[in-house]
Each structure stands twice: as structure tokens, then as C-alpha cells.
């Protein structure tokens, strides 16, 4: 009897130990199950571009909030350097790439590189051609339709009291401070801002067109030289971005001209400095280039690609609308 009792006790102990061991084993497996962190490489054409600073900060914040491991690199406006950075990301085995190209003319080679590595890629801000993108189905471009921003600039001038013809001579005389002419955005903003005027039946006169490379100091210098050369002939100053427009404003003030009275000035991006100028009546208007909206859409498209989404040829461009900003609605954006 004693032997039977001891065996029963021993059997019960073993059963309890076994149950406890199974329970502990289950808890250990549950605690050890963690999702693999996805890595994202972000290439920006240059960090000291005012608009792209806003964009990359929004992009990085969204990605980190979603739990991605993010590395953002500065291309220093050097295509060779950016190409090296892309290759480094590929070697490191990142799960996805988001690229703001230094030069759209290098897009074909860039796309061939990411295709060979089979890495889902989102291009931002500078748009390649549809044919260049069509070779890789795991590629999408997120940006805005630059033609729309140019059209809105022209409409801002048409919405003034004298529709841009300040001196009443029957034509709108303007200078154009262009970004990087290699950039499709610069080309389309230049073309469509003037096209909006001619489509409305206006006669236009281009006094000067100079390359300002999106830079505030160059905008100031070009405007100063043109104001000295053309004087009161200049009725409108078109700038492909706000940074150049803010620079141009400094020269306009120095020349004793007054925006809204004897000259008009428009930009694109709705940077904080430009919004302040619009609110103060020192810029005729600007066009919101929605950095936060584009950043959110870029991440959304990247996540779709990571989940297995692909894009058919001709459907690889995703656009976020621009918005006209005037003294009447500027408060909505500040």
C-alpha cells in the first residue's frame, strides 16, 4: 500500500511538473514573437532646399511613427554621390527605397538599378517619363502636377484688379526666375504660368528669363539686376519657387517698388516665409505644394508595394493637388 501511495504521489507530481513546463513553454514562445522591423532608405537631392527640408522631416516622422527603421541621406545636389548612396542602401539590403532624384536625366539608370535589385521604390518630387518608369512594376512616382502649379500662378495674376497690366499698355510684361531647367517642374511652371495668361486672351512680353536654381540668394540677385535694367517695365515677377520669390522681394523693396501697387510677385510651395509675405501683402500669392500630403501619400504607396502591390505602365504617377494661396485664404495655411 505504501509503495502504491508513493507511486501515485510521484505520478501526480510529474503531471503537475509537465503541465507547468508546457505552460511556461507557451508563454516563452508568445513573448519571443516579434515582427521584423522593415528598413527604408531615403535619398534627398539636397538637405538645404527649403521645401525638401519640410518634406523630408514629414517623411521621416511618418515612417518612424509607423515603426520603420529609417536612414535619410543628403545627395548634396551631386548625382554621382546619390547613385553611390542608392547602391549602398541596396548592399545593406533595405526593404524599400524612397528617392528624390538629383537629376531626372539619371532616372533611367536609377530605375534599372533598383529593378535589378528588385527593391520596391517610390520616387518623389522629380518625375521621370512614363516610359522610363514602365520597365519596373514595383516603382511609383508621388508628386504634384507641375503644370497645375504654373497655371495657378498665372491665375493669381489674372485675379488682380488690373489682371497684371499695371501700366495699362495692353500687355503683361514679366520676368521669369526659373529653378533648375533640367527639372521638369521648372519647365512646366515656367510654361504654364504664362500659358494661363495667353489662354485668357492676354498679350505677354517676356523681359527676361534667368536660372535661379531654387536658391533665395540667386532670386535676389536676378531680380536686382532685372529691376536695374528694366525698371518700371516689369509688372510681374514669376518665381518657380518661394525661396527665390522671397529673395526677389528683397530686391523689389530695395528698388522702392511696392507689391500690389506697381508690381506683382508670385511663387510656389507655400513656405512659412512666403505665407508671412502673402499675409503682409508683400507677395501677390503663392501655390501650396503640400509637402505633408505628399509625404503621407509616398509612405502609403511604399506600404502598398511592400504588401505586394504593383503598378501597370502608364499608371505609375500619383498626384497630390496644389492649392492657390492668396491674402484672403492665407490664414488657413499658417
Image (spheres, rainbow, N blue to C red):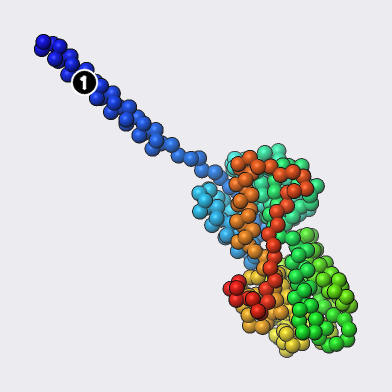
Numbered-mark total: 1
Relative to 65, residue 217 above or below: below
Quarter placement of the N terminus: top left
Percent position of residue 304, x then y: 62, 45
Residue 308, picture quadrant: top right
Q: Where 300 sits versus 48, above or below? A: above
63 displayed left or right of 284: left
The part of the image, by quadrant, that contains residue 59 is bottom right
Q: Which of 108/235 is in front?
A: 235
Task: Judge whether 234 appears above or below 183 on screen.
Answer: below
Task: In this rendered view, identify the residue nearer to me: 63 or 112.
Answer: 63
Q: Residue furthest left?
A: 2
Q: Label 1: few (<14), some or many (≥20) within 10 Å?
A: few
- Residue at 77% across, 68% down: 150
Does residue 191 appear in the picture of this structure?
yes
Above or below, comparing residue 40 to residue 24 in the picture? below
What is the secondary structure assignment of the residue under circle 1?
Answer: helix
Which quadrant of the rendered structure holds the C terminus? bottom right
Q: Position of residue 81 (x, y in %)?
A: 68, 52
Please report the residue visible at 75 percent of the width from the left and 62 percent of the height from the top.
Answer: 146
Judge left or right: residue 182 versus residue 99.
Answer: right
Residue beneath disc 1? 12
Q: What is the x, y in percent for residue 6?
A: 14, 15
Left or right? Give the position of 272 relative to 284: left
Seen from the viewer's position, the closer of residues 234 and 195 is 195
User: Residue 199, position in %: x, y?
Assistant: 86, 71
With 219 as the anchor, is 23 left or right in this view? left
Question: Residue at left 56%, top 45%?
Answer: 39
Can the viewer see residue 78 in this picture? no
Residue that appears at 29% across and 26% down: 19
Amino acid at each position: 500500500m505504501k509503495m502504491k501511495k508513493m507511486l501515485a504521489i510521484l505520478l501526480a507530481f510529474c503531471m503537475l511538473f509537465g503541465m507547468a513546463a508546457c505552460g511556461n513553454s507557451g508563454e516563452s514562445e508568445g513573448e519571443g514573437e516579434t515582427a521584423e522591423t522593415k528598413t527604408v532608405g531615403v535619398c534627398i537631392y539636397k538637405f538645404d532646399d527649403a521645401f525638401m527640408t519640410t518634406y523630408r522631416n514629414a517623411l521621416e516622422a511618418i515612417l518612424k511613427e509607423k515603426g520603420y527603421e529609417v536612414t535619410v541621406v543628403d545627395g548634396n545636389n551631386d548625382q554621382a554621390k546619390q547613385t553611390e548612396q542608392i547602391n549602398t542602401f541596396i548592399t545593406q539590403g533595405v526593404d524599400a527605397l524612397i528617392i528624390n532624384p538629383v537629376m531626372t536625366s539619371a532616372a533611367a539608370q536609377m530605375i534599372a538599378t533598383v529593378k535589378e535589385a528588385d527593391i520596391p521604390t517610390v520616387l518623389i518630387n522629380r518625375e521621370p517619363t512614363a516610359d522610363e518608369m514602365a520597365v519596373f512594376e514595383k516603382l511609383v512616382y508621388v508628386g504634384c502636377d507641375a503644370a497645375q502649379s504654373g497655371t495657378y500662378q498665372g491665375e493669381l495674376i489674372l485675379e488682380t484688379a488690373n489682371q497684371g497690366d499695371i501700366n495699362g499698355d495692353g500687355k503683361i510684361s514679366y520676368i521669369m526666375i526659373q529653378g533648375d531647367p533640367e527639372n521638369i517642374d521648372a519647365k512646366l511652371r515656367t510654361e504654364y504660368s504664362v500659358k494661363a495668361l495667353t489662354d485668357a486672351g492676354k498679350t505677354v512680353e517676356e523681359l527676361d528669363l534667368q536660372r535661379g536654381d531654387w536658391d533665395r540668394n540667386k532670386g535676389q540677385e536676378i531680380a536686382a539686376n532685372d529691376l536695374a535694367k528694366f525698371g518700371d517695365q516689369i509688372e510681374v515677377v514669376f518665381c518657380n519657387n518661394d525661396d527665390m520669390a522671397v529673395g526677389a522681394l528683397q530686391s523689389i523693396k530695395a528698388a522702392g517698388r511696392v507689391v500690389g501697387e506697381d508690381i506683382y510677385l508670385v511663387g510656389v510651395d507655400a513656405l512659412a516665409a512666403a505665407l508671412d509675405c502673402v499675409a503682409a501683402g508683400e507677395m501677390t500669392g503663392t501655390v501650396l505644394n503640400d509637402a505633408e500630403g505628399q509625404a503621407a501619400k509616398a509612405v502609403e504607396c511604399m506600404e502598398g508595394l511592400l504588401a505586394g502591390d504593383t503598378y501597370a505602365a502608364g499608371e505609375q504617377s500619383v498626384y497630390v493637388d496644389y492649392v492657390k494661396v492668396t491674402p484672403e485664404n492665407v490664414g488657413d495655411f499658417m
